[in-house]
Amino acid sequence: MTTNGAFSPMQFSVLLVDSKPIEHQLLAGALRHQGFEVLSHNTEVSALSLGFGTSGAGVIIVSCARASGDSDMSALRSFHISHPLVPKIAMLESDDRETVVKAFRSGARGIFCLAEASFSLLCQCILQVQQGEISASTQQLNYLLDSVCQVPGVRVVDASGQHLLTYREEQVVALVADGLTNRDVASELGLSEHTVKKYLFRIFDKLGISNRVELVLYAVHHGLPQTALAATA
């Protein structure tokens, strides 16, 4: 997707949230040069005026380009909770799978990677999300689809927040709680029934339980829907 000329003046505002003052000013200036009305903000999203975006006419761009991006991603998520109708773009330094999926889950409708795309593509991205579309590369969308298709897992931690089960064991717990037999679990995960039984014995030992019913109850109390219990009745 490319553009050959300057953009005509926009009829909506772009709110730019970036923690880096110099990059913030450069990007804001470039967007204004293309005809966008830019509202700049370089502090936490929680401090923004609650009045912004109530008309649904704006777009917010949040730079999630710090070393970890966690605090910026949290800001994006907080803004999405308070302003769910405002289209949002996550501006990333790298579009690895985990970061892209986290951005989508935080409310982004557009993903723009600084290292992989041109400024003209950012302008196109702004226009797309303002029009209600999703703006992302094929690879980024595949990351999202893969995350939806992944086998679910049940996060089990102790009092100190340490994981009690491995990722594969969490998958087994989720599938058993959904009512799958050992054979079905084996088929879903590409394992043998014998291996699934071994996983279950290890899970029982780690959680201090002795049978599948207790395992389902344990899973229900750790966030699975109540229908998971009925499925094994």
Image: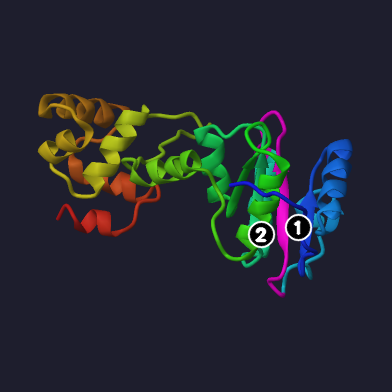
Q: Quadrant of residue 231?
A: bottom left
Name the quadrant of the C terminus: bottom left
Please tell me whether residue 71 is drawn above or below residue 81 in the rendered image: above
> For mark 1, what is the residue?
7
Residue shown at the point (70%, 28%) measured from the top left? 67
Q: Is residue 213 left or right of residue 207?
A: left
Nearest to the observer: residue 86 or residue 10:
10
- Check disc 2 and report its element: helix, strand or loop: helix
Q: What is the distance, in whole Å, between disc 2 and disc 1 at their CAs?
A: 10 Å
Residue 218 lies, with reference to residue 197, above or below; the image says below
Specify the label residue 127 is tagged with: 2
Determine the residue located farthest toward the bottom in the rendered image.
55
Q: What residue appears at the point 70 percent right and 51 percent down from the top-left corner?
A: 123
Give the amino acid at mark 1: Phe
Q: Which residues are magenta?
A: 55-70
Mark 2 or 1: in front is: 1
Neighbor class of circle 1 (other Cα within 10 Å; few <14, some 14-19, many 20+) is: some
At horizontal 60% and vertical 51% (from top left) the residue drawn is 110
